[in-house]
Amino acid sequence: MTIIYSLDLIGTFAFALSGALVAERKTFDIFGVVIIAFVTAVGGGMLRDVLIDAHPINWIGDLNYMWIIASAVVVMYLFKSKIAPWAKTFFIFDTIGLGVFTLIGVEKALNYGLNPVPAVIMGMITACFGGVIRDVLTNQVPLIFKKEIYASACLLGGIVYLLGRLMDLPENIQAISAVGVVILIRSVSVKYKLELPKIKGDLLSRKS
């Protein structure tokens, strides 16, 4: 088991747990909780695989993802009152998962013959769109559209990974650099409450 695969599973668990918690707060039944946990954890990778016509779809080809998601749902039901004090720990796992998912998405897209630009977009989709699907299904405006630097961190991490490949750096350095950039940008943006600028009016209306 490689370190990237191990981190992938940890990220999957963190994403699934966050989805299960959202669904539980929305008073979904057990089926709804499982579905939301599932799409949060693997929805981005599944969408990526559909877009690049990769088979088998990520979770179908590796049932470990299903076991990880199921375990996250069980943990949520057994220990939901104890999870809050661990919020910072789960944020770390979630952020690591974000970086690893970006890396995996870019690498898989390149392996399927995509050009660098769409490959980076596939990395962002892998990391972020499980959360987008979760928010849509739970009737919320997706987090990445209104708050925090999230998708942008993934795009920059994907670009760093491409640069590492272009410079023919060792694979471990490529991976660590890309994931590290995502973690750094995400952590700094949350700590200092940084957000992308919002469009309010236009230049002409401001001048008038």
Image: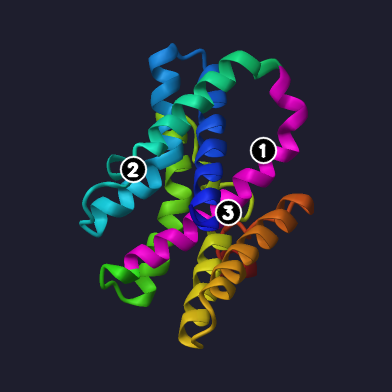
Residue 146 position, x and y percent, is: 57, 47
Residue in view at x 42 percent, y 53 percent: 126
In the picture of the structure, the residue carrying the numbered disc 1 is: 90
Mark 3: few/some/many CA within 10 Å (<14, 14-19, 20+): many
Residue 192 position, x and y percent, is: 79, 54
Q: Can residue 138 be seen?
A: no
Q: Is residue 84 magenta?
A: yes
| Type of amino acid at the residue the image marks with label 3 | Tyr
The magenta stretch spans which residues?
Answer: 82-109
In the picture of the structure, the residue carrying the numbered disc 2 is: 62
Residue in view at x 40 percent, y 19 percent: 32
Mark 1 and mark 3: Cα distance apart in space: 16 Å
Residue 112 position, x and y percent, is: 26, 67
Which numbered mark, 1 or 3, is in the foreground of this view? Answer: 1
In the picture of the structure, the residue carrying the numbered disc 3 is: 150
Q: Can residue 164 be seen?
A: yes
Mark 2: few/some/many CA within 10 Å (<14, 14-19, 20+): few
For residue 85, side relative to residue 156 (left or right): right
| Type of amino acid at the residue the image marks with label 2 | Asp
For residue 113, side relative to residue 11 (left or right): left
Q: Are marks 2 and 3 in contact (CB under 8 Å)?
A: no
Q: Give the structural element (helix, strand or loop) at label 1.
A: helix
Q: Earlier in the sequence, mark 1 or mark 2?
A: 2
Question: Considering depth in this image, is 127 or 132 the residue closer to the camera?
Answer: 127
Residue in view at x 52 percent, y 80 percent: 164
From what the image shows, is residue 59 above or below residue 180? above
Q: Earlier in the sequence, mark 1 or mark 3?
A: 1
| Type of amino acid at the residue the image marks with label 1 | Phe
